[in-house]
């Protein structure tokens, strides 16, 4: 959608005629009921002429449809082949099923039928139906009558003009450019603290909270504003001159002396980029301090050129050295205090953390879906020099928002699941930007480690990681945009019968952007719009519910939103008691991974309630009580994460044969056949190998991923298939050369060390016999 919404920047803003044709497959016809005629209604047309012969009418309607002249005339009025066909089918059905039609149409049809083929002077011609056909087409496709207005509403070529308050002042733009751990944000924050008033805009609640605390600790009163809460610095709830907020929550109407926009490179984010664009173009501040990667300098400079504002660039270098090691870790026996193993799935987090604790070492665990409080607690545990926990296992969630004392970053893998601009799931190598962001966390300035080190778990990955880190970060080329509620309301005025999901589709289809912008991915918005479409809500409320920040892969959270919307539509407040009943609060500490994941989902539900309470205070009145129990839930989740290896063992002992008992944070479904392949060899594989095999089972869905992008070639893969399981997994595309090598290496290590994973030697022999039976 983002790419299809692009158009030439040279086109005139008001010239709708220069725009490309709309995607008419998105135009949903409005159903029209045939005129059935009541007992008291008179068929005026029949009285003036005679009743219609429906057989003759049908013949002439079909002649009308086939005439090339009529099709060309329809195209001139916006009816392409698809719309022309749909409109005709509806027109024909309307006439044939109506007991009476309007008098003027009845007379025309009668004249056509009477004169056709009778040898008399023609009273009428099928072409005379076109005005009636066009009238009907505009009734079922109301957008045809207002296409120019819709194009003007969806014209996104001049976003700077959306913010007149910002355009009314001359702003000074200062770009602090540099890598992770270069002090760029520090210098921007120092200016923020010294100003009379200021706003900090960050991508995460953790970052906003950090600046909020830092400001108040420095005796600079600062409020905190996130999607879920507002915390005032003063006890009397008076607004402070400084505010730290998540970027979506920044005000473009309030004047400030200084504004700080952190992580500006996220302006290219397919889902959230619009928030950075809005802040950059719309913040009403005398000075705008922008922090981020040098790759965004050119785009920010171009965007500011369109506003008539110059950009001052201040470059920073990393404050501590960072070394890419020439050797991989290869075994967890080689771990040292201060090491952080970075994984890209929960399965790997569970597997690695259990292997570490099996070696008698403690480790902290951080991944994206954990509550902020739990992340901070785990970070504190890892950073504490007096705590025996000296190893961290984390996802790329550590890339921003947490201050960590890391000596060495170890990439467990260099491939990760991603979602592209079209909302499609892919598995690909990490980007240079991602690698630098994560690797840069090692050797943080001011920590106990004066330099950082980076390596990989596996030798083969190290060569590729060095290549990735040595590549230049591609420049940020475009900034995200998103339809505003006002624009959608204007669309709905013209298309009152369209669903919200359909309105958004038509908006994106008609939208025009120049080369510096793209329309952000709206799949999550449309998913929620379709989910609550049947619930009677006004458009503004429906729009707000559809922008709620939730993970649509969490069924419990989605179901809760649906219940929220249904009760909201009945004008029944969502009370604390109702929420407790729905979530079965109070909740106990988790006994296995499944229960831990459910607690995380409940925490997300509480977040959702608080987010909605900020927008509908009367309908979600118990935010204070919900915030209290959310803190208690955070403590419960912390207990679970602290005992995560116990939960993993409990999950695996309780899991049915053929299941791993843990869930990936990027679900890739397995077929029954996949599960059977894994189940047949459950006892012969280690826990770690099983985890990898289960996760690999979904890789076939990444159809566009060539073997070379995962570090292997087809002929290499064939040479590795030496057993029934290996052959079958390789043939079905469930394993790559890299994964198979890892499985073999880990299995050999465990045999040498006398460890047999979840089964004993007797289990291995039993499984081998079973396998031989299956071959026979």
Image: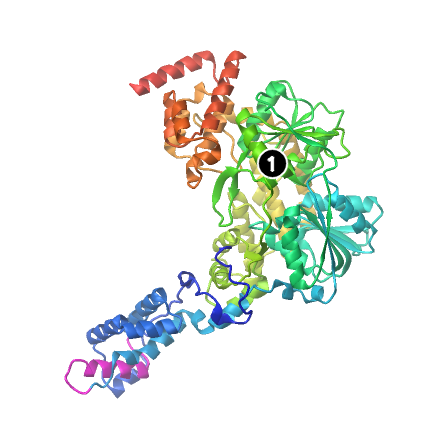
Residue 173 placement: quadrant? bottom right
Q: Where are the magenta residues, as a range? A: 99-121
Residue 84 placement: quadrant? bottom left
Q: Is residue 345 above or below residue 26?
A: above
Q: Is residue 402 visible?
A: yes
Q: Is residue 504 above or below residue 52?
A: above
Q: Is residue 105 magenta?
A: yes
Whether residue 543 sits left or right of residue 658 in the image: it is right
Residue 630 placement: quadrant? top right
Q: Is residue 114 magenta?
A: yes
Residue drawn 19% across and 87% down?
A: 121
Q: Nearer the viewer, residue 642 or 25?
A: 25
- Of the 4 image quadrants, the one containing the C terminus is top left
Q: Is residue 394 above or below residue 14?
A: above
Residue 763, x across and y down, in percent: 43, 15
Label 1 neighbour load within 10 Å: few <14, some 14-19, many 20+:
some
Residue beneath label 1, please? 469
Whether residue 588 sits left or right of residue 134 in the image: it is right
Q: Is residue 616 visible?
A: no
In terms of secondary structure, where does tag 1 sit? Answer: helix
Residue 514, x across and y down, in percent: 55, 61
Extreme residue toward the right, this view:
219
Q: Nearer the viewer, residue 722 or 751?
A: 722
Residue drawn 65% across and 30% down?
A: 639
Q: Nearer the viewer, residue 653 or 423?
A: 423
Residue drawn 43% across and 65% down?
A: 21
């Amino acid at each position: 959608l983002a790419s299809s919404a692009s158009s030439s920047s040279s086109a005139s803003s008001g010239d709708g005629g220069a725009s490309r044709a709309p995607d008419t497959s998105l135009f949903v016809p409005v159903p029209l009921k045939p005129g059935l005629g009541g007992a008291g209604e008179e068929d005026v047309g029949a009285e003036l002429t005679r009743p219609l012969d429906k057989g003759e009418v049908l013949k002439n309607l079909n002649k009308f449809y086939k005439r090339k002249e009529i099709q060309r005339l329809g195209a001139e009025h916006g009816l392409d082949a698809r719309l022309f066909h749909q409109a005709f089918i509806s027109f024909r059905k309307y006439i044939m099923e109506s007991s009476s039609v309007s008098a003027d149409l009845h007379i025309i049809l009668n004249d056509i039928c009477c004169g056709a083929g009778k040898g008399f002077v023609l009273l009428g011609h099928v072409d005379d139906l076109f005005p009636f056909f066009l009238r009907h087409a505009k009734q079922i496709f109301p957008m045809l009558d207002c296409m120019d207005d819709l194009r003007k509403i969806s014209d996104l070529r001049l976003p700077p003009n959306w913010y007149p308050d910002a355009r009314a002042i001359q702003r000074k733009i200062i770009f602090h450019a540099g890598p992770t751990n270069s002090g760029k944000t520090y210098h921007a924050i120092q200016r923020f603290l010294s100003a009379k008033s200021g706003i900090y805009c960050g991508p995460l609640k953790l970052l906003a909270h950090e600046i909020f605390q830092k400001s108040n600790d420095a005796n600079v009163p600062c409020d905190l504003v996130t999607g879920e809460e507002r915390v005032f610095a003063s006890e009397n709830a008076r607004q402070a001159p400084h505010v730290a907020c998540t970027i979506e929550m920044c005000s473009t109407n309030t004047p400030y002396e200084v504004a700080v926009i952190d992580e500006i490179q996220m302006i290219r984010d397919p889902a959230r980029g619009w928030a950075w664009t809005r802040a950059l173009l719309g913040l009403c501040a005398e000075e705008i301090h922008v922090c981020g990667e040098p790759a965004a300098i050119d785009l920010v400079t171009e965007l500011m050129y369109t506003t008539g504002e110059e950009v001052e660039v201040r470059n920073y270098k990393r404050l501590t050295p960072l070394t890419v090691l020439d050797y991989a870790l290869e075994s967890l026996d080689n771990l040292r205090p201060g090491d952080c193993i970075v994984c890209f799935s929960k399965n790997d987090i569970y597997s690695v953390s259990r292997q570490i604790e099996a070696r008698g070492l403690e480790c902290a665990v951080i991944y994206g879906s954990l509550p902020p409080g739990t992340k901070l607690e785990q970070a504190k545990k890892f950073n504490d020099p007096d705590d025996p926990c000296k190893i961290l296992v984390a996802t790329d969630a550590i890339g921003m928002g947490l201050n960590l004392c890391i000596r060495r970053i170890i990439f467990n893998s260099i491939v990760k699941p991603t979602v592209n601009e079209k909302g499609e799931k892919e598995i690909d190598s990490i980007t240079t930007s991602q690698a630098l962001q994560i690797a840069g966390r090692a050797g943080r300035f001011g920590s106990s480690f004066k330099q950082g080190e980076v390596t990989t778990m596996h030798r083969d990955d190290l060569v590729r990681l060095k290549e990735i880190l040595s590549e230049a970060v591609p420049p940020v080329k475009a900034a995200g945009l998103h339809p505003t509620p006002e624009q959608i309301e204007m669309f709905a005025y013209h298309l009152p019968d369209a669903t919200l999901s359909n309105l958004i589709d038509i908006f994106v289809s008609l939208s025009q952007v120049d080369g510096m912008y793209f329309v952000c991915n709206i799949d999550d918005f449309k998913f929620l719009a379709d989910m609550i479409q049947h619930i009677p809500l006004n458009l503004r409320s429906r729009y707000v519910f559809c922008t709620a920040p939730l993970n649509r892969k969490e069924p419990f959270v989605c179901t809760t939103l649906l219940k929220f919307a249904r009760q909201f539509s009945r004008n029944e407040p969502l009370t604390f008691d109702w929420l407790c009943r729905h979530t079965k609060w109070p909740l106990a500490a988790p006994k296995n991974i499944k229960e831990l994941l459910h607690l995380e989902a409940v925490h997300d539900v509480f977040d959702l309630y608080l987010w909605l309470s900020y927008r509908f205070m009367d309908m979600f009145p118990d935010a204070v009580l919900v915030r209290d129990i959310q803190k208690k839930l955070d403590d419960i989740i912390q207990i679970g994460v602290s005992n995560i290896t116990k939960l993993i063992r409990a999950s695996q002992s309780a899991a049915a044969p053929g299941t791993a008992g843990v869930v990936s944070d990027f679900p890739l479904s397995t077929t029954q056949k996949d599960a059977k392949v894994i189940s047949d060899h459950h006892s012969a594989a280690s826990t770690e190998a099983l985890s990898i095999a289960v996760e690999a089972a979904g890789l076939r869905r990444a159809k566009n991923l060539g073997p070379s992008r995962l570090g292997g070639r087809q002929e290499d893969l064939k040479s590795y298939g030496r057993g029934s399981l290996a052959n079958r997994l390789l043939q079905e595309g469930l394993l790559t050369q890299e994964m198979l090598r890892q499985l073999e290496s880990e299995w050999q290590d465990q045999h040498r060390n006398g460890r047999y994973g979840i089964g004993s030697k007797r289990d291995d022999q039993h499984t081998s016999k079973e396998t031989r039976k299956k071959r026979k």
